């Protein structure tokens, strides 16, 4: 027993529905496979001492994974993130403070390594860029809507123009010229 009947592939109007079903199926599949294969939010502990591990993770949560780019070093499983957590641990064992370690990472990788980069001239694009893109999008949308409404305006024809057009369409001479 079928729950619903899919339209024939011969019907050209059914292709958008098949496309939408494919997109929905792919989205559901990707969602479930991502949740099945996803790992924990934090990486495996590096230090044997829980206090040292807590300090490493405290610093790592403020640094961006340079491979993943949308994840902190604390949550990333990338090899580079693991190496950076080891480096943080080594610097902490050498007696460096959190601010010194953060400055070391910025000196080595730039402001991009900070998960929340500071507002300054070199990072201004990161802070202002999304707002400028949104304004640009709104401006383009306004122009599009304005153009569409201008295209939809119909000139008003006089009664005389309409009657002349009707007479031309009803005229047999006009139809003969068009078919020849």
Image (spheres, rainbow, N blue to C red):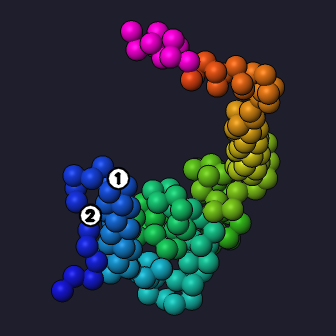
Question: Which percent across, then down, holds residue 12?
Answer: 30, 49
- Of the numbered discs 2 and 1, the one sitting upstream in the chain is 2
Q: Decide which of 154, 172 is in the foreground and name it.
A: 172
> Residue, x 47% and y 60% (percent of image)?
68
Check disc 1: other Cα within 10 Å, few if <14, some if 14-19, many if 20+. Answer: few
Is 1 located above or below residue 179 in the figure? below
Marks 2,1: beta carbons within 8 A: yes
Mark seen at residue 13: 1
Residue 163: image quadrant is top right
Q: Decide which of 57, 120 is in the foreground and name it.
A: 120
Question: Which percent across, then down, holds residue 40?
Answer: 43, 82
Question: Which percent across, then down, holds residue 9?
Answer: 22, 55
Residue 14 in view of the camera: yes
Asked if residue 138 lies left or right of residue 77, the reply is: right
Which residues lie in the magenta part?
A: 171-180
Quadrant location, the C terminus:
top left
Q: Residue furthest bottom?
A: 50
Check disc 2: other Cα within 10 Å, few if <14, some if 14-19, many if 20+. Answer: few
Quadrant location, the N terminus:
bottom left
Query: What type of secondary structure mainly makes up the magenta span?
Result: helix
């Amino acid at each position: 027993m079928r729950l619903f009947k899919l339209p024939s592939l011969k019907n050209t109007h059914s292709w958008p529905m098949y496309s939408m079903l494919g997109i929905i199926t792919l989205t559901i599949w990707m969602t479930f496979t991502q949740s099945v294969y996803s790992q924990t939010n934090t990486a495996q502990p590096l230090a044997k001492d829980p206090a040292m591990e807590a300090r490493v993770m405290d610093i790592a949560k403020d640094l961006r994974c340079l491979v993943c780019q949308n994840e902190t070093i604390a949550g990333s499983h990338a090899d580079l993130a693991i190496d950076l957590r080891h480096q943080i641990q080594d610097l902490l064992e050498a007696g460096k403070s959190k601010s010194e370690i953060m400055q070391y990472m910025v000196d080595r990788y730039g402001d991009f390594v900070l998960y929340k980069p500071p507002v300054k001239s070199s990072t201004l694009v990161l802070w202002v860029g999304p707002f400028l893109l949104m304004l640009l999008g709104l401006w383009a949308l306004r122009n599009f809507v304005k153009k569409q409404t201008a295209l939809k305006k119909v000139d008003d024809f006089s009664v005389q123009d309409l009657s002349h057009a009707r007479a031309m369409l009803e005229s047999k001479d006009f139809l003969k010229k068009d078919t020849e």
